Amino acid sequence: MKHLIVVCQLAILTKVLYCHHFEKFDAPTSPIENVAQLVMSLQQEVSNVRRELRNRMDTMKYELTCEIRNIKDALTKQKGELSAKVDALSLELTAYRKRLKRGLKRIGMQNDDLKGELRLQKAELTAVKGNVHDTRVQVIDRGNLLLQKVNTTNNSLVCHLTDLRIKLFKINNNLEFISNEHKELREIITRRYHQPKTYNSEDYGERVLPGCTYTPLDTLDSDYHFNGTYNASLTRGPKGQPGIGVTEKSWDKEGVTDIKSLFPTMPEDCKDDKKKYLEYAPIPRDCKHGFDLGFMEDGVYRIQPPGLSSREVYCDHHTAGGGWTVMVARRKMPRHILFNRTWHEYEVGFGDPDKEYWIGLKALHALTEGRPHQLRADMEDWEGSTAWASYSFFSVAGPEDKYRMKVTGYTGTAGDSLRHSNMQMFSTLDRDNDQENCESKGNCTSMFPGGSCTKGRGGGGWWWGRCACAQPTGQYRRGRYQGPETGITWWHWKDSNYSLKTLIIKIRPLE
């Protein structure tokens, strides 16, 4: 930049000299003199220009020298600072190396200690392995011995059960004989007193359920006596089984003390074959009672709840020790029954125990009254996963308290979805007893029309508490769905918009 300024100044001086020449020699005397003067002027101007250039060059040189000196000083200062930083970093690296060496030394010592501990543990594990192997051999030997004893006991038990079955068939044949004697004695007494006795359905109001479930075994607790003897010989009973067949008989009819208890009559609306009621052994109270009697296979059994007529239920004898009486069963079937039933239907029960059914509120009250039960729910979703929920206490009150349920003591994997049903009364379509019954409270802020959980949740009866979290009596649907919560649900496992594939709820008396 400075060189450009110098060139510009030279150009300006040249122009000045040229102008001065024409002003000064506007009237030359002779060409030679003019040339001489011009040369002299030019020499003088060139000298001035040289002097000026020299001065400017010296000035520029001085300025450049000053600037170079300043740059050198700045570089020297920066060099000193960088050198100080390098020295500091070198000190830090030296200290870090020392610490690293000390750390590596400690790690090496710890590694040696760990190697020693591992050697000791390996030796201990080898010893334990040898002990486990010896113990395993001993356990296998004891197990084989125990298995032999179990097989021997099982064979004895099978023989004992076979004897019991033979005795049961003998009892059934005896019951058939008693039934025939019953008919003959009725005819004799009718002829003797000329007052034929008739019975109506009211005499059996507490014994007869829809489907004619009366059995002569219900009369075993009657108070009657015989003063007579009969001779019997061993023959073949029903279905080719051994039993007792009567060949010669004689009864002292005067020994009858209670005619009404001696001659219970079949209800008039019973269209079934009376002989089939003689096929059953003495009826157990519930599935646990039957399990204790030796009936250990899953299936449909007839039980006799206290104070009620006998009925068929499904017994689960393989889950958690067996002895479970199924109270409600929902499972995948070609055709499903409806659970939006009336109060009366939920009281007496409905459905097929081998498929889908509800055992009945009266039966639940009769089974759990004065005898606490435990409850278990087993469920399966449509992806094949399973879960369960167990409650250590379960009971159902009587009709005067609208079959209020108490269920506590949850354990399981499905979550406690019965917590809101605890201490709640039962509700159906025609009898709304849930906490959502806001019409009777004068404050209808319920999420369901009219405050009825039964109507809002698909019509199934249940112990609704704020519309609960479990709905075993809902409508059978497939998996997740949109819309009202009307399916078979267990909220704490699959929320309220997932309808389960299977939900079985069962009860068993506490030990």
Image (cartoon, rainbow, N blue to C red):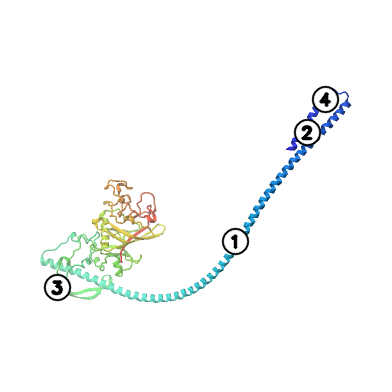
Q: Position of residue 160 (x, y in %)?
A: 30, 74
Q: Residue at x 30, y 58 (%)?
A: 406
**Disc 3 residue type (three-letter):** Asp
**Residue picked out by circle 3:** 252
Quadrant assignment, res 377 = bottom left
Residue placed most toward the observer, 106 or 341 = 106
Q: Position of residue 478 (x, y in %)?
A: 38, 54
Identify the mark nearer the N-term, 4 or 3: 4
| Circle number at residue 99 | 1
Tell us which disc is closer to us: 2 or 3: 2
Element under disc 4? helix
Quadrant assignment, res 57 = top right
Separation of marks 2 and 3 at Cα, in angstroms: 168 Å
**Residue picked out by circle 4:** 24
Check contact, mark 4 vs mark 1: CB within 8 A.
Answer: no
| Circle number at residue 224 | none
Residue placed most toward the observer, 95 or 181 = 95
Q: Residue at x 66, y 50 (%)?
A: 81
Separation of marks 1 and 2 at Cα, in angstroms: 72 Å
Identify the mark nearer the N-term, 3 or 1: 1
